[in-house]
Amino acid sequence: MFTGQYSALDGTTTSQWVPMPQNQYGGVNGLQYPELFGPGALPGPPGQTESAYQITLTATGLPGGVGPNYFGVWISALDPFNDLQIYNTSNQLIAEFNSPTLISALGGCTSGPNSDCANPTPQFACYDPNELFAFVNVFDLNGSIGKVVLYDSGASGFESDNDTVACISPISLFGTSLPTPIAEPMTLSLLASSVIGLAMLRTRRRA
């Protein structure tokens, strides 16, 4: 059994991290989704530079030393200030995927047709055509994922849904793979023990 504990970070207020009803930016089948508003989108503490929340992952019923090695999330209406960070079970930052990284992998929405752009749900089909809607799959190839942190650092929102956790063996990567963007300088030994593979489905999410 996998458990995810959600908690606000960095002075993020209850008005900045809220459940939202399905709309043109996120949510499916009339259900609510978590919306994270960055500084400037809504008032926050003085000097606040980002809002954030984390999902701490735990597992029971697995062999000792084995934990979740897969995390999936539907990122909808991707904004320039959105940032997804992945930590291992030693609380070490092992990968970071921000808006430029994901746009580089999937392509932009203003230079021509892109099947990953615009809301794919029947209720709001084709709304928000200038932003990406994609399900992101993150695999830790040599260890376990301890937590995931979602940040927004500007006057926008970070819409996500369908957080998914699993322990997969063997791992079979699929979709469009990205190189591992490491957020901080890391030693070769740490890189060797914390390799991340990321793949993105280039098909629209099914409602």
Image (cartoon, rainbow, N blue to C red):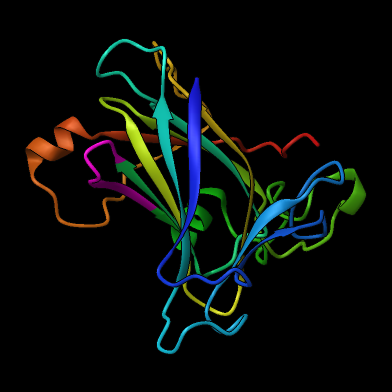
Q: Residue at x 83, y 60 (%)?
A: 127
In reply to whether residue 94 is colored magenta, the answer given is yes
Query: Farthest residue toward the right?
Result: 123
Image: 174 above or below 125: above
Q: Residue at x 44, y 74 (%)?
A: 50
Which quadrant, please, contains the C terminus?
Answer: top right
Q: Residue at x 74, y 54 (%)?
A: 26
Q: Quadrant of residue 146?
A: top left
Image: 65 above or below 175: above
In the rendering, at what x and y percent does residue 197 appear? 37, 33
Q: Quadrant of residue 109?
A: bottom right
In the rendering, at what x and y percent does residue 4 appear? 49, 37
Q: Total number of numbered labels?
A: 0
In reply to whether residue 132 is colored magenta, the answer given is no
> Is residue 132 or residue 25 the one in the foreground?
25
> Is residue 148 or residue 175 the one in the foreground?
148
Residue stretch rendered in magenta on the structure: 88-96
Q: Is residue 84 shown left or right of residue 38?
A: left
Q: Residue at x 78, y 53 (%)?
A: 119
Q: Is residue 52 shown left or right of residue 65?
A: right
In the rendering, at what x and y percent does residue 174 appear? 50, 25
In the rendering, at what x and y percent does residue 23 appear? 83, 58
Q: Is residue 141 shown left or right of residue 149?
A: left
